[in-house]
Image (tube, helix red, strand yellow):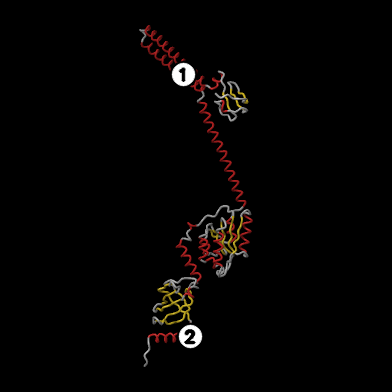
Amino acid sequence: MSVITVSQLNTYLSSVLGGDSRLRRFMLQGEVANFKKHTSGHWYFSLKDSSSTIRAVMFRSHAGRMKFLPKDGMKVIVSASVTVYEAGGYYQVNVTDMQPDGVGAALLALEQRKEKFRKEGLLDPARKRELPFLPHTVGVVTSSTGDALQDILRTVGNRCPLVRVLVFPVLVQGERAAESIAAGIRFAGTQGCDVIIVGRGGGSAEDLEPFNAEAVAYAIAGCPVPVISAVGHEADVSLADLVADVRAATPTAAAVAAVPERSALHEQVRQTVQRLEQAYLAGIRTRQQQLDILTGGLKQCRPDHRIRLHRAECDKLTERLQKAMQLYLTRRKAKLDAGQKECLRLTERMQKSMQLFLARKSAQLTAQQEKLTQLDPLRILQRGYAAVYNENGAVLTAAADVRPGERIRVQLAEGSLTARVEEHHAI
């Protein structure tokens, strides 16, 4: 019996297993365990069932083509071959393809991206931006040859022809479509658009797959202006729809959401004008009421009005005094029947006092009236003085304030004169 080395044994086992056609390519069902994605891009994990476990590896060349990332506990069906890892002395399965057991890879990948975006906050309704009411420029990122573009252009033209539409042609299906769409969104965001429509017409799930790409979703989320996603038909929902600020069921619906209708604008303008007219009239009424209040207050300050008030007050005081005196005399007469002479004497004194009081009050009233009359501007003018105003209505107090040739207005006690200055003499 010959003696062999460990390396020779492992090499022999590798050749034996590799020579078995049944082990070179087969389908294997199992549950993923101990999954690890190495920095090199290789995937290392185990596959197990209820009673056994086997090591597995999926090299970067195959792992890079996968649309989903496996997790521990996920049931999968893999395409693999058995190999021996000679340096470690154990056998393993070399996986070249993997499919989720019971759910499509594309659907699983989509759900994983949704969960990733949800954790990053891209699906949070709070980050959704409102669309501008009346955009000046609408950007359209779609195929230049598709029906979706024509639907958008026709709808925008019918609803609001004044809105400018900038078209950014991109690929909407195929391997390079996702990056083309993302680049189109980023470029459109720098061209002065107020809102951007991204989308395409209906198609198969594979045709719409570029709008589920991470690059497209991140481009929409990072766009500086609101984005409307219109991918496929109403039943189709892509990641672009979920990340966009507004999701439209169709490209036509996206155009309707982007621009208002002319008739609606006309009605809003009419209502705005009506509200402005009402506000203007209300403002005039308020100013008129304020003017009435100020006029009333000015009237209260006029000298003749104040004189009438003082006279009325004096009349009231006189009447009260007379009544009080009469009452006093009546009471004194009832009590002093025996002292009639004293009563007469008191009556005479009271009358004299009253006359003296009335004379004083009359003198005070006359003095106040004279003071108020002296303060009346027109009274000053009646003494031969005049008030002079320049062309702007400002009072002139010095000859130097006016130049020869300028017109002046001279206010007299009765009427006014308009004159022209021939020369002035400054003091």
36 in relation to 14, above or below: above
Question: Mark 2–mark 1 contact, CB under 8 Å?
Answer: no
C-alpha span from label 2 to label 1: 135 Å
Please report the residue visible at 38 percent of the width from the left and 89 percent of the height from the top: 4
Residue at the top extreme?
Answer: 341
Q: Quadrant of residue 157?
A: bottom right
Residue 418 visible somewhere in the drawing:
no
Q: Quadrant of residue 195?
A: bottom right
Image location (x, y in percent) of residue 57: 44, 77
Q: Which residue is denoted by mark 1 in the rendering?
A: 314
Q: Nearer the viewer, residue 229 or 85?
A: 85
Image location (x, y in percent) of residue 271: 59, 46
Image location (x, y in percent) of residue 309: 49, 22
Q: Which residue is denoted by mark 2 in the rendering?
A: 21
Q: Nearer the viewer, residue 162 or 272?
A: 162
Tell me the mark number nearer the camera, choosing from 2 and 1: 2
Q: Nearer the viewer, residue 332 or 133?
A: 133
Image location (x, y in percent) of residue 282: 55, 38
Which quarter of the rendering shows the C terminus?
A: top right
Q: Residues within 10 Å of mark 2 (few under 14, many from 20)?
A: few
Residue type at mark 1 is Cys
Which quarter of the rendering shows the N terminus?
A: bottom left
367 in relation to 291, above or below: above
Residue 424 visible somewhere in the drawing:
yes
